[in-house]
Amino acid sequence: MIAPLVLALALQGGLADRVAAAPDGDVRFSFATRPGVCGDGRSNISLECDDGNCGRHRISSGRYDDDDRGCPCEPGPARVALRKRGARIERLRVYVGGAWRPGADARVTDLGAASTAAATRYLLDLAARGEGDVGHEAVFPAVLADSVTVWPDLLRLARGAAVPHETRRAAVFWLGQAAGQAATRGLSDIVDDSSVDLEVKETAVFALSQEPRDEGVPALIRIVKSNRSPGVRKKALFWLGQSEDPRALALFEEILTGR
């Protein structure tokens, strides 16, 4: 058993040390989210929110969706709940908005607000070493943090031979989203083509994503590099993010580094 003074000193240290020093049970902390991130404080988190329209990139109970429906939403903070047993994190949940439910459970340790740098460092380290579902569940909250660039760490996770497969997949997915944003930054979201033409082009991009890798991946990369439509390029990047292909990772790095 940890002596009270030792525990008190450990809880004043870095976030990883504070989590490690907390007794078994639930451990909570929060951090600031980047602009456009909002949630209902429960199961829904949305990205790219603007004036209450929060349909783009919605996460609902851990599932990714991409639609145009609105949702009741409030901006951050992100609230992370860990289930801890000994040195092992057994479960991770993230919420945006809302507040923790008051309770008298002595097995809850609330660490309060953490800096975004400390929170993302802890979450990405947990992603690299976490067991079971915890590793890939730690990736998503890291991409929500304000004023922190996480894609170099995501690239390392995606390429890490020792990183669990599901965690690598999660890293590749969010790399694709980051690359999509970088490739279209500063460009109008309104495509010159008619909506019908755009839908046809996006359908063709999807069809290419279903082709064998040696045919589909090079075609999608060519679209990203040469197509004039930001929407079409971003859709191609989305499907490249699902491919887990090393050529897609190389393209994401090229876009994000500006090389």
Image: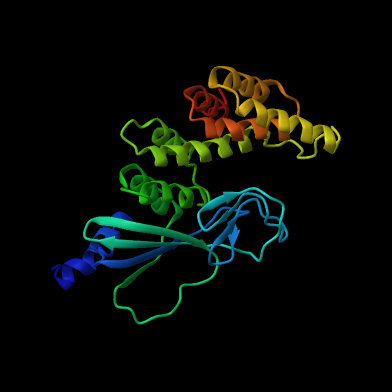
User: x and y percent of residue 156 in the render?
Assistant: 40, 33
Quarter of the picture holding the C terminus: top right
Classify 213 as above or below 198. Answer: above
Whether residue 190 can be seen here: yes
Res 219 → quadrant: top right
Q: Where is residue 94 shown, x and y percent of the image?
A: 46, 59
On the picture, is 187 further left or further right than 48?
right
Whether residue 14 appears in this view of the structure is no
Front-most of 85 and 259? 85
In the image, residue 168 lies at what x, y percent? 42, 37
Along the horizontal axis of the image, is 145 left or right of 203? left
The residue under the point 67% across, 57% down is 54
Q: Is residue 167 above or below residue 213?
A: below
| Position of 204 relative to 4 (above/below) | above
From the image, which quarter does the N terminus lie in?
Answer: bottom left
Relative to 41, 126 lies left or right:
left
Toward which corner of the image does residue 14 lie, by quadrant?
bottom left
Residue 2, horizontal then vertical, whole percent: 15, 67
Residue most toward the bottom? 104
Residue 185 versus residue 213: which sits nearer the camera?
213
